[in-house]
Image (spheres, rainbow, N blue to C red):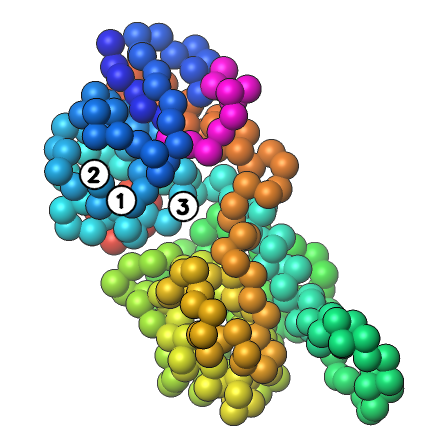
Amino acid sequence: MKKVLVVLPIQEKHHSIIENNIDNCEFRYNNQRNVTEEELEWADIILGNVLPPEMLGKYKHFEYIALESAGADAYVKPGVISGNTVLTNATGVYSQAVAEHGLAMTLALMKNLPFYRDKQSDHDWLSFDKGVIPCSSPIGATVLVVGLGDIGLYYAKLIKSLGAYVIGIKRRKTECPEFVDELYTTEEIDNIIPRADIIFSVLPGTKATYHFYDKNLFSKMKKSAIFINCGRGASVDTEALCEALENKIIFAAGCDVFENEPLPETDRAWNTRNMFITPHRAGFFDLPGTIEKLCTLSNKNLKSWLEGKDLINIVDFETGYKK
């Protein structure tokens, strides 16, 4: 009888999805931030993210942990999880939600909607008529998607359908996927990024991606470029991004994630020109159906684990990516 601790942000109505066709398991449910030491000692398997991750460090007996997040960087740090524990993430669950959020940010910045929203808050109508406020269109735009996993490919499909020319960047060279016109590796980005009107980034948080976007890379972008980050905050040097915006090295940025979260009230980013901020909501559970996808994936992987079958989204502890 396996003991399964479920700390997913779900309601009682979702329990039936988690437990569907699962035998020989005892389930306990709790909030991810209220997990007790007794529950951690009791559990063989954990479904969800225990917060903070460091709580797991002194327990070496877990057989399998299924994260609710696509990012696993906090859980693959040395000392957090035993190397004998199998770890999976939730890659694919949030693809639609994050890609649509990224597309909404893209279009909002192309059409200068944050500017108009600010003027609305100021009850300012007349400044709308003071000269032309330039905008752009996805039709004919060159869009660089950095990180061609499930989210990146979903975004590529959406922006391609609006008439954009899509270039993809990924770790390894493969055949060019559908909805992508050209494909390159991360090592080639310095030569490719000057072509981009839009840069949509969904890089994971790993040692290799830390401050991937630095002063040097921003300097290679077009002055008219729009940068969107819906991946991990640590992939961007925030100070370098703020400088690029304030010095008009690039046109605008939309960030759903930051290296330090929650973003401090005094952070420079809040008042940086043409910075559009959302509070890490792209990959949350606001979009109907996302939580059901997560529960279905959790159930499928748990059943596979119990039957000794292959799991979906096994995480490589060395890279932090799924294998």
User: Considering only order in the chain, which callout, 1 or 3, is on the residue closer to the N terminus?
Assistant: 1
Question: Which residue in the protein does label 1 denote?
Answer: 53
Cα distance in 3D space between marks 3 and 1: 15 Å
In the image, what residue occupies the spot 75% across and 84% down?
Answer: 134
- The reply to whether discs 2 and 1 touch (Cβ–Cβ < 8 Å) is yes
Cα distance in 3D space between marks 2 and 3: 18 Å
Q: Is residue 69 above or below residue 114?
A: above
The local secondary structure at tag 1 comes to helix
Q: Which residue range is magenta in the image?
A: 7-17
- The reply to whether discs 2 and 3 touch (Cβ–Cβ < 8 Å) is no
Viewer-side residue, 307 vs 286: 286
Q: Is residue 246 above or below residue 59?
A: below
In the image, what residue occupies the spot 31% across and 67% down?
Answer: 210
Q: Is residue 277 above or below residue 85?
A: below
In the image, what residue occupies the spot 34% across and 34% down?
Answer: 34
Question: Which residue in the protein does label 2 denote?
Answer: 56
